[in-house]
Image (spheres, rainbow, N blue to C red):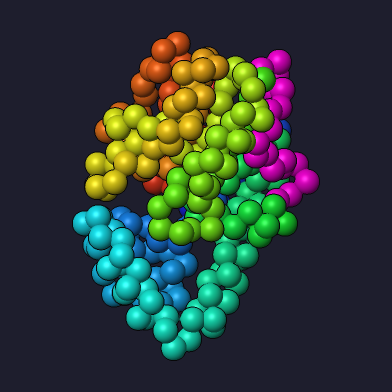
Amino acid sequence: MSDVHGAADALARMAPPGSTVFVLGDLVNLIDYRTMEGIIPDVVGVDVVRRIVRLRTEADPDAAAGVWAERTAEDRQAIQERIADRMRVAYGSVARALEGYTAYVTYGNVDRVAMMTEALPGSARFTDGESVEVDGIVVGFAGGGIPAIGSGGEVPHDEMEAKLAKLGPVEVLCTHVPPAIDVLAQDLLGPIPKGSPPILDYLRRHRPRLHLFGDVHQPRATRWRVGTTTCHNVGYFRATGRPFLLG
């Protein structure tokens, strides 16, 4: 699954104990664009977040950044500390939900890697830029979001390219973001595609059997083919509470 965004209760009950699960990033909920719930509205207020969300969905990230800068100008450090404290609590809740699963976890654009990995239980393995063999299948993981608004988990394209080159050929590729294909990368409510050109290049070069990803909560298409590779958006777990079953 991907885009857990704090849905720890659903995560804890989604599968029998001992199940193997892949978690493809965005473990904490900073802003739920549907409900305006999340860590950031809790800290700075819903009204400010509504303005930021509106500007982002209107493809005006500079104006959104200006609203944020204005709101945080007088107490920026205190706000960042309150956000960090709440993120630690949220990672702890998700980590407890993962106990009992054999979990392979990578990160998304909203994640703070050091904070996340510190919280993970012993049954979970952080994976990024490496491949693992799971039930005889070689699975590669490359975490991080595309460069966009400066979130902590964003990855420059050249860094993503280097991660993928390090992987080499795999049977299943797991990333947080989709390849740079508009129907997979374009959110129905968002103006800016969120696809990765290096991932698309990797699919064309190495042709894994499957590519699993998330990030785009309401994509124009959830399944697409790139050559011989079937690409699946595994879903917005916070909204659905359902994992994607790899059969």
Q: Position of residue 62 (x, y in %)?
A: 31, 65
Q: Is residue 159 visible?
A: yes
Q: Which residue lies at the image location 71% right of the left edge and 27% below the top edge?
A: 132
Q: Is residue 93 visible?
A: no
Judge whether 245 appears above or below 101 on screen. above
Q: Which residue lies at the image location 43% right of the left edge and 73% below the top edge?
A: 42
When asked about the image quadrant of residue 126, the answer is top right
Instruction: Judge whether residue 65 is colored magenta.
Output: no
Instruction: Judge whether residue 133 is colored magenta.
Output: yes
What is the residue that sits farthest to the left in this orientation? 58
Count of numbered circles on the image: 0
When asked about the image quadrant of residue 89, the answer is bottom right
Judge whether 206 appears above or below 108 on screen. above
Q: Which residue lies at the image location 61% right of the left edge and 29% below the top edge?
A: 165
What is the residue that sits farthest to the right in this orientation? 122
Front in this rendered view, residue 160 or 216: 160
Q: Position of residue 81 (x, y in %)?
A: 57, 77
Q: Position of residue 84 (x, y in %)?
A: 58, 70
Front in this rendered view, residue 30 or 61: 61
What is the residue that sits farthest to the front in this orientation? 158
Q: Quadrant of the C terminus?
A: top right
Q: Which residue lies at the image location 66% right of the left edge and 17% below the top edge?
A: 137
**Range of the magenta residues?**
119-137
Image side of residue 124 versus residue 186, left or right = right
Q: Position of residue 190 (x, y in %)?
A: 27, 48
Judge whether 201 appears above or below 42 on screen. above
Image side of residue 209 versus residue 58, left or right = right
